[in-house]
Amino acid sequence: MKKTRAPDLTAERIKLVLDTLDRWKGKLTWDLLIDAIRKDTGHTYSRFTFAEYTEIANAFSLKKDALRGTWKGEGGQPRDERVRAALEQVERYKAKVERLEMQNQLLLEQFVTWAHNAELKGVTVMMLNAPLPKPPRDRTKGVE
């Protein structure tokens, strides 16, 4: 029986993977992440597919590092469920901010590389900053 291929990772599916990583607790492996995404989407992606997407690979590595540091110093859990839920939400937001800051840094580095390479090819900053052309509008003249 032929195995069906999972659909391409769209921006929405990538966001789902990143959100899953942001709220991840406990041991993290590629297989565990793949299983979690399969449960959420019904599709099985490979480790290599996830690793092809820099955002996912970086977020995975960052979360692994964060989890390694987290397990050493955690104290007891608060008894109040609302406080516990708020603390979990704070942790998710902190993880997301950390991931987005890292992603922003990588994009800035990519921009510097592009700017340098463009300059080597004689493309000026003014040329790069030129506004995009207006899209053609499908307007009929004189038709009512």
Image: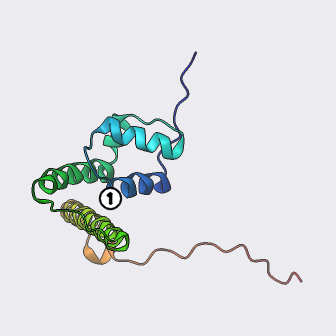
What residue is rendered at 36% in x and 69% in y? 81
How many other residues sit within 10 Å of disc 1, few (<14), some (14-19) or many (≥20)? many
Residue 137, position in %: x, y? 67, 74
Q: Is residue 50 left or right of residue 66?
A: right
In terms of secondary structure, where does tag 1 sit?
Answer: helix
What residue is rendered at 34% in x and 69% in y? 89
- Seen in the picture, residue 64 relative to 116 is either above or below; the reply is above
Residue 129, position in %: x, y? 34, 77
Q: Mark 1 = which residue?
A: 22
Frontmost residue, 52 versus 88: 88
Residue 71, position in %: x, y? 15, 53
Frontmost residue, 125 versus 34: 34
- Specify the quadrant that holds the C terminus: bottom right
- Specify the quadrant that holds the N terminus: top right
Q: Residue furthest front?
A: 79
At label 1, the amino acid type is Asp
Q: Residue furthest top?
A: 1
Frontmost residue, 11 versus 136: 11
Count of all numbered marks drawn on residues in the image: 1
- Seen in the picture, residue 29 relative to 85 is either above or below; the reply is above
Residue 99, position in %: x, y? 26, 62
What residue is rendered at 37% in x and 55% in y? 18
Q: Is residue 52 left or right of residue 132?
A: left
Q: How is the image coloured?
A: rainbow
